[in-house]
Image (spheres, grey):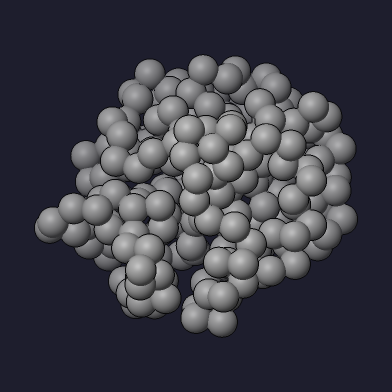
Amino acid sequence: MLKIAASLLSADFSRLGEEVKNAEKEGVDFIHWDIMDGHFVPNITFGPAVIQSLRDKTKLPFNAHLMIEKPYNFIEKFAEVGSDIVSVHAEACDHLQHTVRDIKNLGVKVGVALNPATPLNVIEYVLDDIDLILIMTVNPGFGGQEFIPAVMPKVQEARQMVEARGLNIDIGVDGGINEKTAPLAVKAGANVLTIGFAIYGREPKLSIQKLKDSLR
């Protein structure tokens, strides 16, 4: 099932409550929070307090995408403030299996994100315990970047790996997704499209319903 995640990285930070409500009204399936610390990626964005302040503004699930160093020090806090999914970068985890286990023990879903140049085999031994593979289609840190088509074979490989093992894992892409690149990602096997700039950062803005209709 195709799902659209609205990334607030390109939203108007002065009116995040409205941006969340508008995303829900437009038909997105969950809200994607790009959590950046200025170390793992060269940018700083949201913290747990922001997520907590907006949790009651929508019934949509929240994915806290932790683009931070030592994410295991923060997973409990992001779960406490209402994240339904906590996603960590494999590159940032000294012991990925421990971090995945700890997230599961908090009672929320587990996502593992991979940068464009990170091979898929780093998650092979945690597949049974995760709910989302989030494949970056840009180098993380800033919204509005150009999609990297060379990552599509990795998306395809991820889909084949999941299906070969009979697992129910979402395959997501994040970065540069719009009406032109979304079909490429879906064809490769992605079923979760994280979209920020095309929804919030440009005119005319992307119609979520039209995109969903075009990909059926």
Picture residue at 19% right of the left edge, 59% below the top: 205
- Residue 41 position within the rendered picture, expressed as x and y whole percent measured from the top left: 52, 33
Picture residue at 67% right of the left edge, 35% below the top: 69
Is residue 168 or residue 89 the one in the foreground? 89
Quarter-wise, where is residue 49 in the image?
bottom right
Is residue 49 or residue 205 the one in the foreground? 49
**Does 101 sit left or right of 176 as displayed?**
right
**From what the image shows, is residue 154 above or below residue 18?**
above
Total of numbered circles in the picture? Answer: 0
Q: Is residue 65 visible?
A: yes
Picture residue at 48% right of the left edge, 33% below the top: 42
**Does 70 sit left or right of 134 as displayed?**
right
**From what the image shows, is residue 130 above or below residue 165?**
below
- Residue 44 position within the rendered picture, expressed as x and y whole percent measured from the top left: 50, 45
Is residue 175 or residue 160 the one in the foreground? 175
Where the C terminus falls, by quadrant? bottom left
- Residue 86 position within the rendered picture, expressed as x and y whole percent measured from the top left: 67, 52
Picture residue at 49% right of the left edge, 63% below the top: 30
- Residue 171 position within the rendered picture, expressed as x and y whole percent measured from the top left: 54, 41
